[in-house]
Image (tube, rainbow, N blue to C red):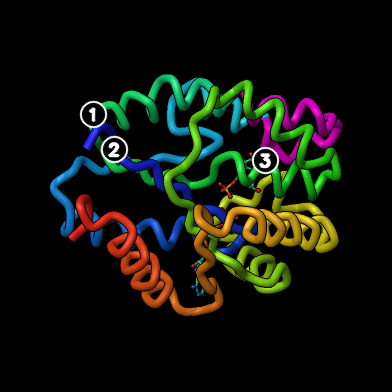
Amino acid sequence: MTKGIFITIEGPDGAGKTSLIQVLAPMIEKASKQELVLTREPGGIPIAEKIRTIILDPKHMEMDERTEALLYAAARRQHLVEKVIPALNRKAIVLCDRFVDSSLAYQGAGREIGMSEIASINEFACDGLTPDVTLYIDVESELGLERISKGRKTTEVDRLDNEALDFHKKVRAGYLELVKDNPDRILTIDGSLSIEEVANTCFNRLKERFPEFIN
Ligand SMILES: Nc1ncnc2c1ncn2[C@@H]1O[C@H](COP(=O)(O)OP(=O)(O)OP(=O)(O)O)[C@@H](O)[C@H]1O
Ligand SMILES: Cc1cn([C@H]2C[C@H](O)[C@@H](COP(=O)(O)O)O2)c(=O)[nH]c1=O
């Protein structure tokens, strides 16, 4: 065992990632001797949380789409250096809510900047680090947006949540393209199931994949 495992969780807005992590994390903790680090993008450390506030502020409607892509990549770089890489070097299991696939789907496909342009700025930011596995929680855009609007009182609604349905459909199409192109790394989970069913499916897939870490 030379390093830890880097697990990323992806999905359209309202897929249920935050809810999933709350159920999945204690399951992993119970089944593993390794340290578990929970984190998110953009954010996870003070500098990246500040960048998150700037990106997601609903008042920042004038933000240029390339500026947006570069801010996500900048937050990512700092988060990797300060938190993710040191944790992997300690052999921890890192469970990260969103990573580069979010930039490819949201900025590459949703904003139509292009996946290859987004991939190149992220190659610079990540310097070769890729997830060991990605759990992609798939939901129809309509369902994701309906969940977010129902949960408005308790869930923060940000500048990207406020985008039109058409944007969210392009994001999901981007994710489905990534799934097709990365069949070994990205595991698709049906996000329309209950939170418990989604968590159990994710846990079993992780156990099969990393028996030396989770058993
Ligand atoms: N499997 C599920 N079935 C029904 N409702 C769900 C499910 N998962 C999450 N929800 C509800 O949907 C709303 C959004 O969930 P959550 O915040 O976990 O999603 P998310 O993927 O983290 O969203 P975002 O990416 O927009 O932050 C919440 O009100 C939550 O209770
Ligand atoms: C990492 C990343 C995120 N986004 C978007 C996706 C969401 O709309 C917000 C983050 O909020 P959440 O509560 O974590 O869902 O930001 C993006 O567009 N590009 C990215 O690289």
Q: Residue 4 carries which label?
A: 2
Q: What residue type is labelled 3?
A: Ser
Residue 59 relative to residue 6: left or right: right
Q: Give ligand 2's quarter of the image.
A: top right
Q: Distance between the residues labelled 2 and 1?
A: 7 Å
Front-most of residues 134 and 64:
134
Identify the residue position indicated by label 3 in the image.
Answer: 103
Q: Which mark is nearer the camera, 3 or 2? A: 2
Residue 154 visible to an observer of this rendering:
no
Q: Which mark is nearer the camera, 1 or 3? A: 1
Q: Which amino acid does label 2 sit on?
A: Gly
- Categorize mark 2 by other alpha carbons within 10 Å: few (<14), some (14-19), many (20+): many
Residue 146 visible to an observer of this rendering:
yes
Q: Give the range drawn in magenta.
A: 55-74
Q: Position of residue 59 (x, y in %)?
A: 76, 36
Residue 111 relative to residue 140: left or right: right
**Image quadrant occupied by the N terminus:** top left
Q: Are marks 1 and 3 in contact (CB under 8 Å)?
A: no
Q: Does the residue labelled 3 lie within 8 Å of ligand 2?
A: yes
Residue drawn 40% across the image and 40% down it: 39
Q: Which mark is residue 152?
A: none
Residue 82, above or below 201: above
Q: Residue 90 carries which label?
A: 1
Residue 78 relative to residue 146: left or right: left
Q: Do the residues labelled 2 and 1 touch (CB within 8 Å)?
A: yes
First reached walking from the N terminus: tag 2 or tag 1: 2
| Secondary structure of residue under mark 1 | loop
Q: What residue type is labelled 1?
A: Arg
| Secondary structure of residue under mark 3 | helix
Q: Distance between the residues labelled 1 and 3?
A: 27 Å
Residue drawn 66% across the image and 61% down it: 180
